[in-house]
């Protein structure tokens, strides 16, 4: 599942490629034919990401907002005028029959298109509908208007493990498996520790580290790296997947800081990784 920072990357791409431009839309798959017809020919006015939710606001009558949640397997693919893929997971079969929504803008060499496949939510909503969707979410560390106090108020009262709370989109919006494992490491907290036993200082560190690593990933166009350069082999600037994280998918390997074997466990049906030495219970 794409983590929340990728949705902010998507929002930026839409803003740069289609912001304030007339957009043409269709639904090759047919499942969003009415919505695509309603949006066709409108101008993209604004893009917003809240956690894993993307909202594109268009000109014209209400409903003005396209709400997209990618879910587990959804994704955007971007193409240039020659149908060369610009970003997104490589599409092996570029057949468009499974494209829920396609947006196009520009003419000739400047044409850009974005295709949406596999999303769990792709719907038009009015402003109230957007507010309702956002109201279900906790604060998103990547947003300037986020209030971490709202997340802390839930964490400090919860007996659930902090590794699970970070993944709960109603507590903090945006974290997936990478951040829910790496952020407790960066704060020196065992992900199994109940929220009630996390100190305010530890929570504040987790919040600021989450905001830092996520915004750095956005600046890299999405690539997640949490390791400090001092903790990974010297390279010519390229950081491999193996060297990018302290604990995520590193079970059995030695901790980059202390050498202890990294552990893995199931937490709420999904995995979590941690260093038993660097992250006391
Ligand atoms: Zn360690």
Image: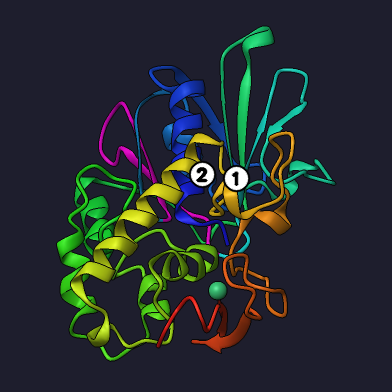
Do the residues under discs 2 and 1 have CB atoms within 8 angstroms?
yes
The response on whether ligand 1 sits within 8 Å of label 1 is no
SS at badge 2: helix
Expressed as whole percent of the image width and height from the top left, the position of residue 194 reads 32, 88
The answer to which of 264 and 70 lies nearer the viewer is 264
Going by the image, does 36 lie left or right of 164? right
Asked whether residue 36 appears in the rendered view, the answer is yes
Dividing the image into 4 quarters, which one contains the C terminus?
A: bottom left
Residue ID at (51%, 30%): 13
SS at badge 1: loop
Q: Which residue is mark 2?
A: 217
Q: Residues within 10 Å of mark 1 (few under 14, many from 20)?
A: some
Within the magenta stretch, is there residue 60? yes
Dividing the image into 4 quarters, which one contains the N terminus?
A: bottom right
Going by the image, does 61 lie left or right of 33? left
Q: Which residue is mark 1?
A: 223
**Residue that protrudes farthest toward the top in the picture:** 108
Expressed as whole percent of the image width and height from the top left, the position of residue 269 reads 55, 86
The label on residue 48 is none
Q: Is residue 227 above or below residue 169?
A: above
């Amino acid at each position: 599942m794409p983590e929340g920072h990728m949705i902010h990357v998507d929002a930026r791409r839409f803003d740069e490629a289609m912001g304030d431009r007339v957009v043409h839309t269709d639904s090759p798959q047919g499942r969003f034919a009415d919505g695509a017809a309603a949006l066709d020919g409108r101008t993209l006015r604004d893009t917003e990401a809240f956690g894993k939710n993307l909202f594109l606001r268009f000109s014209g009558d209400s409903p003005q907002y396209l709400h997209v949640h990618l879910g587990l397997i959804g994704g955007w693919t971007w193409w240039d005028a020659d149908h060369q893929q610009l970003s997104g997971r490589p599409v092996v079969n570029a057949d468009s029959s499974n494209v829920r929504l396609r947006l196009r803008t520009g003419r000739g060499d400047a044409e850009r298109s974005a295709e949406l496949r596999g999303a769990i939510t792709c719907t038009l909503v009015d402003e109230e509908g957007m507010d309702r969707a956002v109201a279900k979410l906790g604060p998103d560390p990547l947003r300037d208007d986020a209030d971490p106090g709202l997340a802390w108020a839930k964490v400090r009262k919860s007996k659930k493990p902090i590794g699970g709370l970070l993944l709960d989109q109603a507590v903090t919006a945006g974290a997936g498996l990478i951040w829910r494992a790496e952020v407790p490491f960066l704060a020196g907290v065992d992900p199994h520790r109940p929220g009630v036993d996390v100190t305010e200082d530890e929570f504040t560190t987790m919040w600021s580290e989450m905001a830092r690593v996520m915004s750095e990933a956005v600046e890299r166009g999405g690539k997640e790296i949490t390791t400090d350069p001092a903790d990974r082999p010297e390279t010519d600037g390229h950081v491999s997947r193996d060297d990018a994280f302290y604990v995520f998918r590193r079970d059995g390997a030695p901790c980059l800081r202390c050498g202890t074997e990294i552990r893995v466990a199931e937490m709420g049906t999904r995995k979590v990784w941690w260093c038993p030495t660097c992250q006391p219970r």
